[in-house]
Amino acid sequence: MKKIILFAASISFLLLLSSQNFAQQDYEIVQKFRSTEKQIEQSIKSAQTLADIDSIQTHINQLQASFLAHKNLLDKSLYPDNFNSSIQKLNDDLSLRKEDFNQVSSLQTQVSQMQTEIDSLNTKNASLLSQIEQMQEQNKKDIAKLEQTIRELRYSLLRRDKLISSMLGSLLPPSYEKNGELSPNDKEKIYSKAKHEDLLSNLERSIDDNIKFLQVTTLNPQDLNTIRNQESSLETMWNKSGPEIIKIYSERRQEVKNAKEIDSAFISWKSAINQQAWCSIRQKFVDHGVALNNFSNQQEFTQALTSYIDTQMNDASGSSSKKAYKVFADTIWYSSIKPDWVPYLTSNNQLSEGNLGVIEAKIGQWQTSVGSSNMIWLYIVIAVVIIGIILFLVKSKSSKNQSTKTEEA
């Protein structure tokens, strides 16, 4: 009996020991799955290339194959997840990470293409500017060719500005629009992209080329409005991204001065647009032989016009003053300056209603002066005719009296 009891106890002990061994093995299987799962999750977060993504996918597939035999055990132990959902979650995280890389790769490709086009435009614009300067220096008469070159340069400058604007717009991540903050990783990406694309140098060169273009051409109000909108659009994009670029460059103590100079470059561009308007207006007068004092703002413009009119009214004879008035008023002011340039100047705060009123009043005085001069000549002609008639009548009467006396004698 004792042997039976001892044998039963031994069997129970072996079963208990075996059960504990199985439990220990199950625990180790679950822990190993969880450990491998966490390692894969960390690998997904730290992946740097698409090659890393492909390697991680292999590990997920191996994890699924290795533990498939223990699916039932894991389904019970991974609550609230299970074996399939854990594998699916890893695949989903990997897909999202892969999509991030695909978007970055696509953006890098676009940026690379834009950079290539900008490099091409830089070369082309430099060549076109050189051609225009050479044509002007040599005083070539081929106006059609010059105008075509100017149109081509304008389009090329506009195209490059749009590309640079797109680059600026691509720097800040979507998350910045939501919370207005950049992570260290975001800052590193922005700095790397700006350096790789030579963004600041390209932006400065674009502004400089636009200023040079304004200095070597004569434009109409429509052209200047287009360029003004072009400048405003690019400056708006810079104001959106520029402050962050400056901060990032400042943190790295690199090229901070260049970044800050962009703001003053935009101011110079706007000033060049304003000066181009005054230069184009003055050229209108020069083309018709009207020599005005130089002017670069509305006060100088008003003074130049009123001074010229005063000189013409005081120094010119009646006929020459009338001729000068027709050229100034009819050919230039009322045909070109007032209908085309005055609306542009007033809408861009370059000419006030007060200064315009002074100019118009002075032109009115000149018109009255020319009209009065004409009336004086008319009165003189009438007086001469009347005197002639009187002399004719007196002479006729004298001849008639003389004839009567002769007959009586």
Image (cartoon, rainbow, N blue to C red):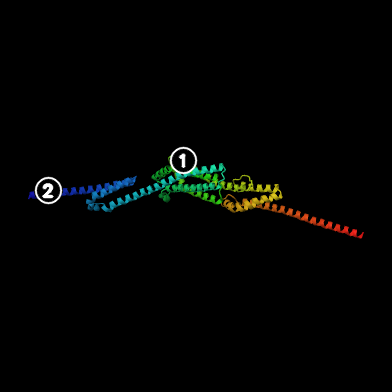
Q: Using a 10 Å C-alpha cutoff, classify the residue at mark 1 as few (fewer than 14 neighbours), some (14 to 19) or many (20 or more).
A: some
Q: Which residue is mark 2?
A: 10
Left or right, 26 with respect to 334, comes to left
Residue 191 found in image quarter? top left
Q: Using a 10 Å C-alpha cutoff, classify the residue at mark 2 as few (fewer than 14 neighbours), some (14 to 19) or many (20 or more).
A: few
Numbered disc 2: secondary structure: helix
Q: Which residue is mark 1?
A: 256
State yes or no: discs 1 and 2 in contact (Cβ < 8 Å).
no
Q: Earlier in the sequence, mark 1 or mark 2?
A: 2
Q: Nearer the viewer, residue 251 or 392?
A: 392
Which numbered dot is residue 405? none
Please, which residue is most extreme toward the top here?
Answer: 253
**Percent position (x, y) of residue 286?**
62, 46
Numbered disc 1: secondary structure: helix
Q: Residue at x 33, y 50 (%)?
A: 95
Left or right, 94 with respect to 218, comes to left
Q: Residue at x 39, y 47 (%)?
A: 109
Inspect the image, locate mark 1, and give the three-letter code of the amino acid beneath it.
Val
Q: Nearer the viewer, residue 388 or 232?
A: 388
**Percent position (x, y) of residue 212?**
53, 43
**Percent position (x, y) of residue 58?**
28, 47
Q: Measured along the vertical axis of the image, is residue 275 above or below residue 379?
A: above
Please, which residue is most extreme toward the right here?
Answer: 409
Q: CA distance from mark 1 to mark 2?
A: 83 Å
Left or right, 75 with respect to 225, comes to left
Please, which residue is most extreme toward the left here?
Answer: 1
Left or right, 157 with respect to 303, comes to left
Q: What is the count of numbered marks?
A: 2
Q: Nearer the viewer, residue 327 or 134?
A: 134
